[in-house]
Image (cartoon, grey):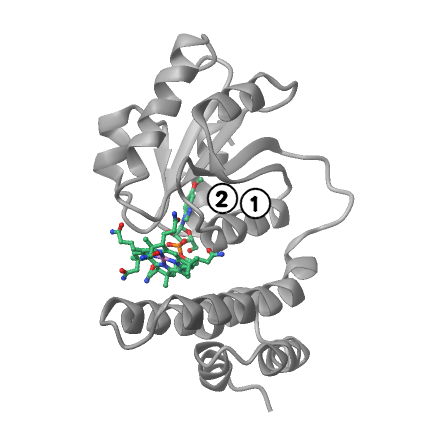
Amino acid sequence: MADLKELAAALMRGDAPAVDKMTKEAVNAGIGVKQILDDGLIAGMQVVGERFKNNEIYVPEVLIAARAMYTGMKVLEPLLVKAGVKPVGTIAMGTARGDLHDIGKNLVSMMMRGNGFKVIDLGIDVSPQKFVEAAKEEGVNLIGMSALLTTTMPSMKATIDELQKAGLLKKVKVLIGGAPVTQRYAAEIGADGYAPDAASAVDKAKALLGM
Ligand code: B1M
């Protein structure tokens, strides 16, 4: 029986084999991918975040939970990614310089792929120069930046400044997100768009490309 609360609990204790099994069970039970993500994997990770914040658990436990989350995401990815669809746009995505968090970025990437975008994954700790190089690539019309630390948010501004200097802001739109990022911050640094979660990131990306 697929129980998303149990899935969240398995993720919280970092039990990757159980997360794998329960995610598959949830899929087989016909539960929607978004619901499995929201009420299972993301719900579990939110609790992990609270416990981490309250010093009830530490980095190793969080890492183990993150690994368990990937196990579940791996099961869901093929369901999100539709094969053979002509890309509706191409987004180069990365986590801001100095930032090693990649779960949110990967979720956004999965959702983008699932909605017909081609995603160029630049990885974590991406320098403004690397974003600029990616923006020059043929076909790239969106730059996606994720930041989870207040200390790495300024690198988003530095990237936009570099894109501006290189004359690339006419070619690409910039979309940003991540837990500490807000619409207000996006407006402040001159980003074209902000999204609070992976699903809205897709909507925003489409809107930015006039779809
Ligand atoms: Co870190 N960490 N962490 N961490 N970590 C946070 C972010 C923190 C809030 C925890 C806390 O104190 N409560 C805190 C940041 C405080 C701050 O700056 N305000 C923090 C800290 C302090 C740190 C370290 C400094 C800890 C230390 O070493 N002392 C360190 C920094 C390392 C570095 O980056 N240089 C660190 C390390 C780590 C781990 C490596 C252990 C691990 C990361 C593993 C990994 O990513 N592979 C980790 C984790 C897992 C977390 C928490 C617990 C969970 C983050 C996460 O994955 N959330 C986090 C606490 C929390 O957020 N509650 C925390 C789930 C994910 C789906 O959400 O990424 O927000 P999120 O993505 C969402 C949206 O934001 C949005 O869509 C996603 C899906 O809905 N979104 C976008 C994201 N990117 C987007 C881009 C878009 C649009 C939307 O457009 C392009």
Amino acid type indicated by mark 1: Met
Q: Residue at x 57, y 45 (%)?
A: 112
Q: Quadrant of the N terminus?
A: bottom right
Q: Nearer the viewer, residue 132 or 28?
A: 132
* Residue located beneath label 2 in the image: 202
Tell me if residue 35 can be seen. Answer: no
Asked if the beta carbon under badge 2 is closer than 8 A to the nearest atom of ligand 1, the reply is no
Disc 2 and disc 1 in contact, CB within 8 angstroms: yes
* Nearer to the camera, 210 or 8: 8
Crowding around mark 1 (Cα neighbors within 10 Å: few <14, some 14 to 19, many 20+) is: many
For the residue pair 59 and 148, the one nearer the viewer reads as 59
Residue at the right extreme of this rendering: 84
Residue 190, quarter of picture: top left
Ligand 1: which quarter? Answer: bottom left
SS at circle 2: helix
CA neighbours of label 2 inside 10 A, class few (<14), some (14 to 19), many (20+): many
x, y percentage for residue 181? 29, 43
Determine whether 81 is above or below 128 in the image: below
Residue identifier under label 1: 112
Q: Along the polypeptide, which appears first: circle 2 or circle 1?
A: 1
Q: Residue at x 54, y 21 (%)?
A: 135
